[in-house]
Image (cartoon, helix red, strand yellow):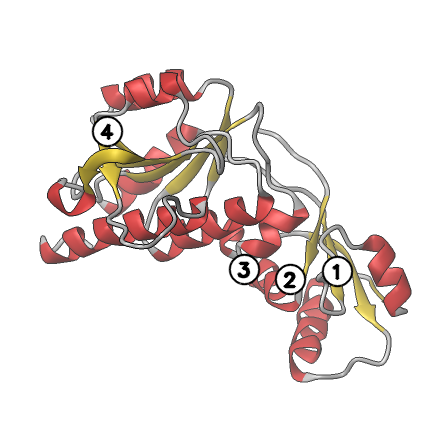
Amino acid sequence: MRYQEYTIEGRNAVLEAYRADQPIDRLFLLDGCQDGPVATIRREARKKGTPVRFVTRERLDQLSETGKHQGVIAYAAAYEYAEVEEILDAARQKGEAPFLFLLDNIEDPHNLGAIIRTANLAGAHGVIIPKNRAVGLTAAAAKASAGAVYHTPVARVTNLVNTMETLKKEGLWFVCADMKGTVMYDLDLKGPIGLVIGNEGSGVGRLVREKCDMAASIPMKGDIDSLNASVAAGILAYEAVRQRRAAGVF
């Protein structure tokens, strides 16, 4: 397991961290701010025994990694990446076919956070990211997830292709987002599946693409020919949700 201290910024993200029992080492609040969300965070901090410091906006700006702290910055004592096997175990315990997101070299922390948020809401059991040439769970990613990072496990692997090979032995099929693929409505997305989302600029890499069983295209009628990675992930995920609901497995 891998641990690191990092900041959690924004009211919703900090509150979700408390609700998920994420250990908070210390909390910085904007001096003089007494509104409802901040009062709730202060109550949670008292219950958990978190040291609280009231500081100026200038000090919060200095501490912030995202520039969007909303008057609240917490330092998490640690974050623990999941193991892939733990994600599969979560699916087994629920008696559900594994539903995973695999991200091929996503570099924008806001995209990563938004995809984790979508994965959580779509009922996915976890997200897998590579260690190299990709963003990890930074403060910006945690904030963009709106707290989902505390509920949806994220595994970080050395080699995405090898991980896909291992998961195939567990019965998973992989579908990647690809403009030249089959229209997503014509694919079966109900079983044990991994949605593979590629880099914001170059898409899914060749080696990863070759390990995918299917390629899904999203119908588009506008004047541009691509979607933001997190938007594409959301559209594909909810086509899977639609199919699973129709089959009575969601």
Residue at (9%, 53%) from the top-left corner? 247
Up the image or down, 175 lies above or below 233; here it is above
In the image, taking residue 35 as reference, residue 248 lies left or right, namely left
Amino acid tagged 3: Ala
Mark 2 or mark 4, which is nearer the start of the sequence? 2
Amino acid tagged 2: Val
Residue at (33%, 34%) from the top-left corner? 88
- On the image, numbered disc 2 is attached to which residue? 14
Residue 157: where, in percent of width, then height? Answer: 49, 24
- On the image, numbered disc 1 is attached to which residue? 73
Mark 3 or mark 2, which is nearer the start of the sequence? 2
Residue at (53%, 54%) from the top-left corner? 145
Let me know if residue 15 appears in the view. Answer: yes
Mark 1 or mark 4, which is nearer the start of the sequence? 1
Between the C-alphas of marks 4 and 2, the distance is 35 Å
In the rendered image, which quarter is residue 121 located in? bottom left
In the rendered image, which quarter is residue 117 located in? bottom left
Between the C-alphas of marks 3 and 1, the distance is 14 Å
Dot label at residue 172: 4
Amino acid tagged 1: Ile
Q: Are marks 4 and 1 in contact (CB under 8 Å)?
A: no
Q: Residues within 10 Å of mark 2 (few under 14, many from 20)?
A: many
SS class of the residue under badge 4?
A: loop
In the rendered image, which quarter is residue 128 located in? top left
Amino acid tagged 4: Leu
